[in-house]
Image: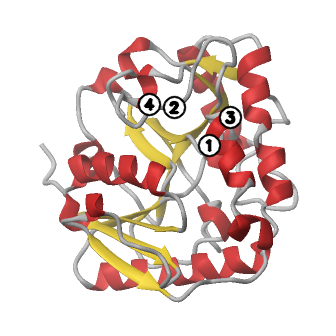
Amino acid sequence: MSELKRIAALTMVRNDDFFLRKWVEYYGCELGRENLYIYYDGEDQSVADFCRGTNVFLHSKIGQQVVAAEKARLRFLSEKAAELFAKGYDLVIGVDADEYIVVDPKLGIGLREFLSQQSIGVCLSPLGLDFGQKLGEEGDLSIDETFLSQRHYAQIGTRYTKPSIIAKPCRWGSGFHRVKGHNFHIARDLYLLHFGYADSKILEGRLGDADRVAQGWKKHIYKRSRTIKYATEKKARDFDRWTRLARICQTWCRPPYALNKPAMFELRIVVKIPDRFKDVI
């Protein structure tokens, strides 16, 4: 059995306590709360009680427009990741508060054990699953139940096949979508679950968030909210078959404008999540 690696997870948040609570709960269980690093974007933010036991920092607000703000945010987080490697961590996970990296339950092991078994040169990517809400079948997302007992449909999304796990200091691109100067490698049986647009009520709240609107996020939120439409209207495909095909496709297909990002011919494939995942998160 491989020796367990020392793994940190970091994120930056603003006005996102709903997902951050689940983030702390999930990664705290998988990696240990003492290995979580949370940076609040803005000294006007209040640190939530559920962050107790983690490493929390208030950072001056990165208040530029969305494109510039994202570049600055990921430059900052890349620097913080480098500091964590200097402290002796073997791996650093960088994700947003609404993103959760999970191991397929069929393996019967947790995230730390899975990653400790992987040979990672620079970075490793889970396969991205962008969750929607199937209107008429799924209600409001509750923090008191597991997310995967409430949400069952996701689009296989290249945007969320991210090099979120790094093994040495490097520079993430905006949104963790690439590592500059390096290729990406997609792990088998590892998934990044994105829930940011998986609830119509939460989405309405984001559209009413003055900070997000001021930074220019409104158009982006409208565009990404189509995941709810896809989950509601598209036929759900077999999970195991289509995630296997997607992993092959995203490994070999690249957009001409970014050869270190995955592509999938603009296919919009919705899959139904197997019951074996329902207690994972």
Q: Earlier in the sequence, mark 4 or mark 2?
A: 2
User: Could you say which quadrant of the image residue 57 lies in?
Assistant: bottom left
Q: CA distance from mark 3 to mark 1?
A: 6 Å
Find residue 253 and report its horizontal and vertical position in percent: 76, 43
Position of residue 22 relative to residue 150, above or below, is: below
Q: Secondary structure at mark 3?
A: helix
Residue type highlighted by circle 4? Phe
Q: Earlier in the sequence, mark 3 or mark 2?
A: 2
Q: Picture coordinates of residue 31 (x, y %)?
A: 23, 54
Do tag 4 and tag 2 residues touch (Cβ < 8 Å)? yes
Q: CA distance from mark 3 to mark 2?
A: 9 Å
* Cβ atoms under marks 3 and 1 closer than 8 Å: yes
| Residue at numbered disc 2 | 141
Local crowd size for mark 2, using a 10 Å CA cut-off: few (<14), some (14–19), many (≥20): many
Taking the spot 75% from the left edge, 53% from the top edge, the residue there is 207
Q: Nearer the viewer, mark 4 or mark 2?
A: 2
At 38% from the left and 21% from the top, the residue drawn is 278
> Residue tagged by mark 4?
147
Q: Earlier in the sequence, mark 4 or mark 3?
A: 4
Residue 62 picture location, percent across and down: 63, 83
The total number of labels drawn is 4
On the image, numbered disc 3 is attached to which residue?
200
- Three-letter amino acid code at the position of disc 1: Ile
- Inter-mark Cα distance, 4 to 2: 7 Å
The kind of residue tagged 2 is Leu
| Residue pictured at 23% horizontal, 26% vertical | 108
- Quadrant where the C terminus sits is top left
- The tag on residue 202 is 1
Q: Is residue 116 above or below residue 228?
A: below
Numbered disc in front, either 4 or 3: 3
Q: Are marks 1 and 2 in contact (CB under 8 Å)?
A: yes
